[in-house]
Image (cartoon, rainbow, N blue to C red):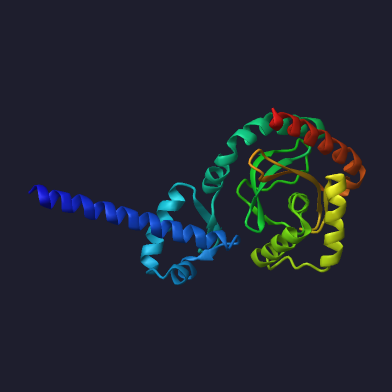
Amino acid sequence: MQAAKEAEEKNAAQAGIQVIARAASILRTLENHPNGLSLGQIAKSVELARSTVQRIVAALAAEDFVIASGPGDVRIGPGLVRIGASAGSNAADLIRPHLRALGETVGETVDLAVLSGGSTVFVDQVPGRQRLVALSAVGERFPLHCTANGKAILACFSPEDADDLIDESLGEHPNFPLKNRGKLRAELDQIRKSHIAFDLEEHGPGISAAGIALLDPMGRPIAVSIPVPAQRFADQREILSNQLKLFRKRIRAAIAR
């Protein structure tokens, strides 16, 4: 009886490990496809039956680790993003009150993002107070090469490493081609000097943004950006830039303590 019980417990443990390994494989597959995949595409990629993938995805969705990205498609969800960001939680905790203060000062949406592969991922947000504001959900993934926070993060790296990240960004976001790599390189050189990056309706029409980035105590880049409807961005560009520079100075001092 004892031997049978031990064998049963061993089999249950092995089954549990197998489920975790399969879930991890599914999540790694989705990490490389920020726009999401269908259950059939996931099943083909991880070489599992579609019914098995469906059960695991349903369990992941219940924990907010994956969410729907379209009819029948799923992508990485905000629950997993929050866990991924928890390794830098001390820095995030230090930044959060400053993020709220910045939002109060400028009256616009303020986003906090981290680097994930060839993308930036929003991990926190302070909504703007204007009638017309720019909002994106926490957990959203954006290209590095055509967003303010993405360019600010790229500027944290050497030109060679930044080029590699640009290639990753283009691979993860094929709907956002890069028209002129030389121009982007020159822009990154300027950002390294000024610390301010801009997205002038490059990622999407009607929205422009200013952003900054710095390294946390673990050497990982974090970025803060202020997206604004383009119709009023030009008038606020200098004000937003100055506020972001002050914000960066305060955060660097807080992190260094």
The x, y position of residue 10, in whole percent, is 22, 52
The x, y position of residue 23, in whole percent, is 42, 57
Report the front residue among 220 and 35.
220
Left or right, residue 158 beside residue 119: right
In terms of image quadrants, where is residue 247? top right
Q: Residue furthest left?
A: 1
Query: Which residue corresponds to the image point at 55% horizontal and 43% vertical from the top-left?
Result: 82
Query: Which residue corresponds to the image point at 88% horizontal and 52% vertical from the top-left?
Result: 190
Q: Quadrant of the C terminus?
A: top right
Query: Which residue corresponds to the image point at 53% horizontal and 65% vertical from the top-left?
Result: 37
In terms of image quadrants, where is residue 22? bottom left
Q: Is residue 134 above or below residue 41?
A: above
Report the front residue among 174 and 126.
174
What is the count of numbered marks? 0
Left or right, residue 152 beside residue 217: right
The x, y position of residue 49, in whole percent, is 37, 69
Left or right, residue 61 beside residue 179: left
Report the front residue among 192 and 31.
192
In terms of image quadrants, where is residue 52? bottom left
Q: Is residue 227 visible?
A: no
Q: Is residue 87 visible?
A: yes
Query: Which residue corresponds to the image point at 39% horizontal and 57% vertical from the top-left?
Result: 21
The x, y position of residue 123, in whole percent, is 63, 43
Q: Is residue 159 above or below residue 234?
A: below
